[in-house]
Image (tube, coloured by chain):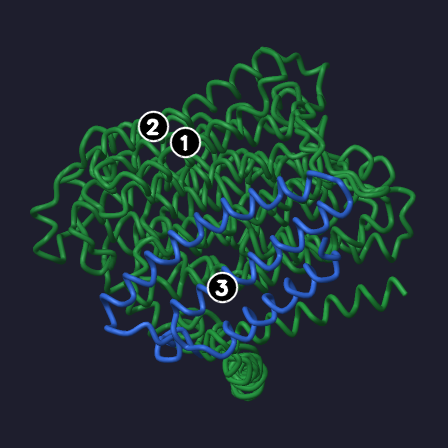
Amino acid sequence: MVPAGGYLLVSALLFSLGVMGVLLRRSAIVMFMCVEMMLNAVNLSLVAFSRLLGDPTGQVLVFFVMCVAAAEVSVGLALVIALFRNRESIDVDQIRLLRG
Amino acid sequence: MMPQWTPYLVGLPLLGFLLSGLLGLLWPRYRRWEIGIGVLAVSVVALAFLLALGLFVGLPQEELPLRVVLYQWIASGDFAAPIAFRLDTLSLWMTLIVTGVGALIHLYSIGYMRGDAGYWRYFAYLNLFIAAMLLLVLADNLLLLFLGWEGVGLCSYLLIGHWYADREKAFAARKAFVVNRIGDFAFLIGLLWLFREVGSLDLGVVLDRAGAIESTALGAIGMLLFLGATGKSAQIPLYVWLPDAMAGPTPVSALIHAATMVTAGVYLLARLSPLYVLSPGVLGLIALIGALTALLAATMALVQTDIKKVLAYSTISQLGLMFLGAGVGAFSAAIFHVFTHAFSKALLFLGAGSVIHALEGEQDIRRMGGLSRHMPLTYCTFLLGALALAGLPPLAGFFSKDMMLTAALGSGHEVLWFLGLVSSLLTTLYMGRLLVLVFHGAPRAPAVSRAHEAPAVMRLPLVGLAVGAVAAGWIGWPDLLGHGAWNWIGRWLSDSTADLEHGLSLGLEALSIALSVTVAVGGLWMAFRLWGRAGLEADHMLQRRLGGLYALWQSGYRVEAIYERLFVRPLLQGSAAPLRWSERYIAGGLIGLASRSAFFIGSGIRRLQTGLLSLYALVMLIGALGLLAWFLWRSL
């Protein structure tokens, strides 16, 4: 039996990796994947707490997060494809038309 | 007839105004439907007249005055101003004059304004004019009266400037507005002062408590209100707008001079007569101003060459006589003269309009003459109107003028009575001159031979008004005949006006009447001899004989020039510097500062919007961490 602290540690590591990825990488696809990673890090900690406290609410919440993530990915990927068709690039630093 | 119908008297013309105005504004095709516009405008005023007639017949004199409250308009602390109408003998009589003569002028306008581009606008304003005047006359509250007072001023501005594309006419409209505004300012101060003294502006309360006001305050209030009346009724010193007001279409002049607008001042004096009789000094001043106005305007009328200007100065002169009448305490006689003068003056103006119409816009009497052969009906009616105005018995003008003059003599103002008599003589002279130069003699312009009678819709009002000009005086026979038993109008109006009794012996009254008859007949005879023989030469002969005096009359006693030097030019020059200053520092400076500071702040903040996605994400992260830190710190 792995102690709960282990799950939380992995979750925190995954979340931090995701944040770093979103901040530092410039490819839209990779940024997306990092956002997904952050979501799944949260999912992991939710499941761990659910197990620890014996309350299934946390696991139900994970299903919701996965659903929303799936919907979000479909919209996001469609945007990325549209972007690539127009600009031949998915480098977010070069897409800055909306600036003051 | 129920008194509850009273609001419709004002409402009907107002409805006509709204319908004509809105339909004309929103639906361009309606503007060309002249029959529809004209019939609508005439019928609302005619209906109002029938309504007034119904009220006049249906309400016994003993039941008056009545008060009809529509709703509470303003209620603030102690002050309350309801929309309330007062039905008494005075307001009912004025309503009959306004709607009756007004309806005939509306009818005449259908023919006169045919083909005018602003037809719908004209009739809309004409209806509004009647509505405002009825509001003024019927108001039970001085604030509501002031609303009508201002409305009348506005309508006169709009209608005098009907052909606003012509600069001269637009300026004339502006002059009328500004000069009236000076009087209105005094009027408003008078109203506020009156409110401070009495604590209410309801007519009933004001007239009841007039005796309790301290006499200096009462005199000042009376003076201020009288100054307002001189503006509306074109008396010295504010008469200068009326001759210029001839720039409007001729039926508008008829409306302003006969039914609406200028009668407002006389009405105000009669309405507040219980207040005025308490300050004899103010009354004396009113009489003096009236007599002087009557005399000076009559001399100016004698030398005018524009047919409408003659009539304009004649109106000022007649209004002067009404003020003289009011000033000597014969308020009901003044209103009686409003009534008889309305018929003859409207008739003269509409006749002049027909002449101008027939001569394709010619207004100079030096280029007329001999029109009686071409326009017999216009000639006959114009003749009756002129004789009635000149005060020839038994036509209408004689009775009312005589009533005022005997009152002036009876109240001991012999000098003013004499001035009134002299202006009556001058009236007969300029009316005779006008009549002869326009209609008699040989034509002095080729256009005269092409002149023709106006269409039936314009002839009908002439006939109607001519009947009035002949018979309107027969409701007020002098005391000499029947000891006042035949003076119906005096008994009717004195319910509402506080006439001063004058103890004039029958012998003196007979003398006064005999003198005015002599003056009327003699003056007309003189005028017909002078101008009938020599025509325009008579003018030149007068000019040679009178020399400087004639030139003074022609220049209108240089009043216009004096006003120009004294008020207009200093005002324009004095306001030039503040205008430049405010343009530069207020419009240019302050407003520029506001716009520039918004621009400056924006140019700083816009740098935050970089378009860099990762920067936004970083800011979000910092924000989220900050929130987290805040909550953790709080829970500690």
Percent coordinates x, y for residue B66 in the rendering: 71, 21
Q: Residue at x 45, y 46 (%)?
A: B257
The chain coloured blue carries which letter?
A: A
Q: Is there CB contact under 8 Å for labels 3 and 2?
A: no
Where is residue B346? Give x, y as percent.
39, 39
Task: Establish if B551 lies above or below B135.
Answer: below
Please state which amino acid type lies under the numbered disc 3. Answer: Val
- Which chain is disc 2 placed on? B
Residue, disc 1: B16
- In the image, residue A48 sits, relative to residue B489, either above or below, namely below
Please state which amino acid type lies under the numbered disc 2.
Answer: Leu
Disc 2, SS: helix
Residue corresponding to mark 2: B40
Q: Residue A24 in the image: state x and y as whole percent.
A: 49, 79
Which kind of residue does numbered mark 1 sit on? Gly
Estimate the spatial distance between the alpha carbons at disc 1 and disc 2, rounded to whole Å: 7 Å
Determine the residue located farthest toward the front in the rendered image. Answer: A1
Q: Mark 1 or mark 3, which is nearer the start of the sequence?
A: 1
Mark 3 lies on residue: B240
Quadrant where the C terminus of chain B is found in the figure: bottom right
For the residues labelled 3 and 1, the Cα–Cα distance comes to 32 Å
**According to the rendering, which colour does chain B have?**
green
